Amino acid sequence: MTGRCCSARTASFPTTPLGYGQLIDWLAGFGRVVQVGVEGTSSYGAGLTRALEAEGVAFVEVDRPNRQKRRKVGKSDSLDAIAAARATLAGEACGAPKAKSGNVEGIRVLGVARMSAIKARTQSMNQIRSLVSTAPVDLREQLRGLPILELVRTCAGFRPGASSDVVSITKLALRVLGRRVQYLDGEVAQLDTRRTALVKDVAPQLLAAFGIGPHTAATLLVAAGDNPERPRSEATFARLCGVAPIPAGSGKTDGYHRLHRGGDRRANSALWTIVLSRMATHPETRAYVARRTKEGKQTAFIMRCLKRHVAREIFKLLPRQELGLGDLRSFTTLGWVRGIRPTRSLESRGHGDARSRSNEPGSLQGCLRERASKGAGISGSSWRPDHAARTPRQRDVHPECL
């Protein structure tokens, strides 16, 4: 907890369910808990994030501390906690963390296992090629001209016996590597089957789009998270995927934009794969590429524009629910994204004054009554009434990408 005079009070709690409860009680002892800043909500802070979510405590994701500032004051758990609290109080931390309670989280963990299996399989295949190159002459001539799949099958079927000569030992090593590749192939196939089923369950409309397969769809869903309302607009989603150009103009180059190399690079790679597929087989995309090529545009520039267009298309296909005035849970979720998510009552923990404050003007009930009296519906666009009137430059969209 950080006060106005930059004084801080810290405490340590075990990273267990009991420790999380003690932390929430400790925070509530200072008064009403308005918001909590958590660093590493997708890694070491995932358990704390789930505990806060279960208790209904509003929280935001805090970025890693600035390295230059940290180098001056040092680093420790207490200093990091104080920095997170101050970033939350100052409004610098306003990101909504990903929810890790749905099928998208399952898609993510399956992707982690698949990635490690593919990496190990590739490593084993490279080792087979290397051993074949340095094997004795007779064995090398037998294996060096085989395609990789046939080479793996041949190596897996070797029977070296109990002999200790170089040829037998080399065959034993090749058999181990070949059977490892076959086993990892089975793992990848099993993970792909299960992950594809989850993707079809979560976003069948995404798989129906041209050029989007299970792998790219899974990557884009993981980038959006279990709560796809986190990106408040298609421009935000484009920035998340690293396809929103950044203004880089000056007094001499007004309106100049440069490539944005931030964002989720795996999602950016998925967009690149979709664009590459459409450039080869999609008639409308091929016509666009031909027209832009005649205008003198380079292929890299055309692909950047196409990736921006695909990001806009995918944003509309994300599994989003329509938010209505009577949907209290949807309103709460949207408020979480906007940084005004209400705090659930802590009466069960002995803090009865939290419920009495739920009728304040800034509370959830107060917002509902105010908006109902004005006759305004609660939707994603109603939070920013000037969204439609904003210019492309204000929405961080490159004019060439419209």
Image (cartoon, helix red, strand yellow):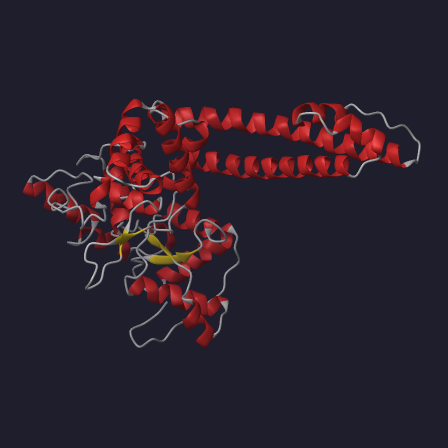
Please indicate whether residue 137 sits to the left or right of residue 363 in the image: right
Q: Residue at left 59%, top 35%?
A: 118
Residue 101 x/y as whole percent: 42, 38
- In front of the other: 97 or 188: 188
Nearer to the camera, 242 or 167? 167
Please tell me whether residue 304 is drawn above or below residue 4 in the rendered image: above
Identify the residue shown where x is 30% and y is 43%.
Answer: 238
Above or below, 356 relative to 123:
below
Q: Residue at x 21, y 59 (%)?
A: 253
Query: Which quarter of the figure is the N terminus placed in?
Result: bottom left
Is residue 184 in sight in this rendering? Answer: yes
Residue 264 vs residue 364, the one in the foreground: 264
Q: Where does the image place residue 63, in percent across and percent down from the top left?
A: 39, 58
Q: Residue at 12% of width from left, 45% of height from top?
A: 385
- Asked whether, in this view, residue 201 is left or right of residue 188, the answer is left
Q: Is residue 10 visible?
A: no
Q: Quadrant location of residue 334?
A: top left
Q: Quadrant of residue 361?
A: bottom left
Rendering coords of residue 193 (x, y %): 52, 24
**Quick one: quadrant of the C terminus?**
top left
In this rendering, the count of numbered labels is 0
Q: Nearer the viewer, residue 136 or 379?
A: 136
Vertical position of residue 302 compared to residue 317: above or below: below
Q: x and y percent of residue 55 in the render?
A: 37, 48
